[in-house]
Image: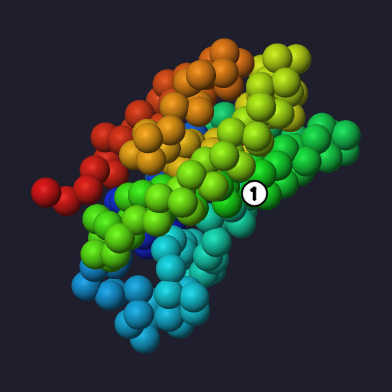
Amino acid sequence: MVLTLFGNPQSGCTKRVATVLYEKQVPFTFVDVDLVKGEQFTPDHLEKQPFAKVPYIDDDGFILYESRAICRYIEKKYPDQGTKGLIPTDPKAEALFEQAASIELCNFNPYATGAVYEALVKPRFLGQPTDPKAVASLLANLEKSLDVYEKILSKQKYLSGDAITLADLFHIPPAVALPATGSTAMQTRPNVARWFKDLTERPSWKKVLEEFRPKA
């Protein structure tokens, strides 16, 4: 049975999972959960994703939610398919991957996703006003984090070393959405810009842009 991804084309977390599925060359079908219509609150969806969010996967009856957990599962299930080594197996290399993954989760995602939510999601999808002070605070913290990223990436190609891992790929959807906040933080630091360009030029992400377009 082909894996099924339940999500939304405009959801960054859905795009994160789709990127890894394409990176690993795993066939899948996509079911669009209409968030505007509230399909994430239906009993069937809540049975699979009790927090009323997207995405989740159904892999021949195995249900899993939380995008980063799904990505790890995909890599573990298909280690020799597509791009290899997205989770290293050497203990030290794996520890450096987990360090990088923690950096993304704690020092990048809250600020980037928070700013995008305030500047884009609230006014466009929720009909709520943007809080400019909140956006400014989130972007200021993001800038501080990216100053550290710049130092790290001045010494190596990717966040955990010279080979790409899931930790790098996790950044793509919120980072791509940052211009909607008025931020150029990903472009104004040479090493961050080089790394970000590398990530967004990968065929997997280009495939996401092609296949996961929002509805007209």
Q: Tag 1, which secondary structure?
A: helix
At horizontal 27% and vertical 57% (from top left) the residue drawn is: 123
Question: Residue 149: x percent and y percent?
Answer: 67, 28
At horizontal 45% and vertical 82% (from top left) the residue drawn is: 47
- Color theme of the render: rainbow
186 is higher (above) or lower (below) than 176: above
- At label 1, the amino acid type is Leu
In which quadrant of the rendered image does the N terminus lie? bottom left
At horizontal 57% and vertical 39% (from top left) the residue drawn is: 140
168 is higher (above) or lower (below) than 5: above
Outermost residue toward the bottom? 43
Whether residue 92 appears in this view of the structure is yes
Whether residue 89 appears in this view of the structure is no
Total numbered badges shown on the rendered structure: 1
At horizontal 26% and vertical 35% (from top left) the residue drawn is: 210
Q: Nearer the viewer, residue 211 or 3?
A: 211
Question: Residue 114: x percent and y percent?
Answer: 49, 53
Question: Residue 6: x percent and y percent?
Answer: 37, 62
Outermost residue toward the front? 133
Left or right: residue 141 versus residue 29 is right
Q: Which residue is mark 1?
A: 105
Question: Residue 107: x percent and y percent?
Answer: 66, 44
Outermost residue toward the left? 216
Q: Nearer the viewer, residue 127 or 96?
A: 127
Say which quarter of the image contains residue 189.
top right
Q: Nearer the viewer, residue 145 or 76?
A: 145
Say which quarter of the image contains residue 86.
top right
Say which quarter of the image contains residue 66.
bottom right
For label 1, the crowd category at 10 Å Cα-Cα, with few meaning under 14, some 14 to 19 and many 20 or more, is: some
Q: Nearer the viewer, residue 112 or 211?
A: 112
